[in-house]
Image (cartoon, helix red, strand yellow):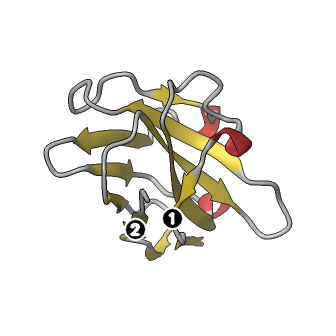
Amino acid sequence: LLQLVESGGGSVQAGGSLRLSCAASEYSYCQAWFRQAPGKDREGVASITIGRGERGGITYDDDSVKGRFTMAQDDTKMMVYLQMNDLKTEDTAMYYCAARRRDCSRMEDAEAYNYWGQGTQVTGSS
C-alpha cells in the first residue's frame, strides 16, 4: 500500500517561506499538493508527473500561487516538494500530498487520487 508522509509545515509571517516535503513509500504516476482552509473545500495547488525530472510535467492549478510556489521532485528518493515563497495569510490551510497511478490530467479532481497523506498545517500570519 502506497503511503505518503508530509512534513515541513509551520507558522510564518506574511512574506516568509516554507518548504513542504512528501515522502512516498513506493512509486506512483502522479503526485499533487492540495490544501484545505477551514470551512472551504479541498483545492488543488500543483501536480507533478513522477519520473520526468526535477520539475517535469508540473501543473499549477491555483493561479494565486503561480510565481510564488514551486513544486519539484527527487524521484531517486521518492520525494516531492512544495517550495512556498512570499506566503500570504490566505495561504493558511492544511496541505495534503496525494498520489494516483494514472496521469495528472484534471489534477484538481481530489476524488481521482487514491492515496493521501495525513496533512501538514501551514499558517501565514500578518
Q: In this view, does 50 lie to the left or right of 86?
A: left
Q: Residue at x 45, y 77 (%)?
A: 10
Q: Do the residues labelled 1 and 2 touch (CB within 8 Å)?
A: yes
Q: Given the image, on which type of amino acid does mark 1 rest?
A: Gly
What's the distance in space between the residues labelled 1 and 2, CA to CA? 5 Å
Residue extending farthest to the bottom is: 11
- Where residue 116 appears, as percent x and y from the top left, is 55, 59
- Quarter of the image holding residue 15? bottom left
Q: Is residue 38 left or right of residue 117?
A: right
Residue extending farthest to the right is: 39
Looking at the rendered image, the quarter that the C terminus falls into is: bottom right
Closer to the camera in the image, 25 or 92: 25
Query: Is residue 7 positioned above or below 116 on the image?
Result: below
Q: Which residue is the site of mark 1? A: 117
- Where residue 72 appears, as percent x and y from the top left, is 30, 40
Residue extending farthest to the left is: 76
> Which type of secondary structure does the marked residue at label 2 adopt?
strand
Q: Given the image, on which type of amino acid does mark 2 rest?
A: Val
Q: Residue at x 37, y 40 (%)?
A: 70
Q: Which residue is drawn at 41% across and 67% down?
A: 6
Q: Which residue is the site of mark 2? A: 5
> Which type of secondary structure does the marked residue at label 1 adopt?
loop
Looking at the rendered image, the quarter that the N terminus falls into is: bottom left
Badge 1 density bin: few <14, some 14–19, many ≥20, Cα 10 Å? many
N-terminal of the pair, mark 1 or mark 2, is 2
Query: Is residue 68 positioned above or below 26 on the image?
Result: above
Q: Which residue is drawn at 71% across and 36% down?
A: 109
- Quarter of the image holding residue 88? bottom right
Badge 2 density bin: few <14, some 14–19, many ≥20, Cα 10 Å? some
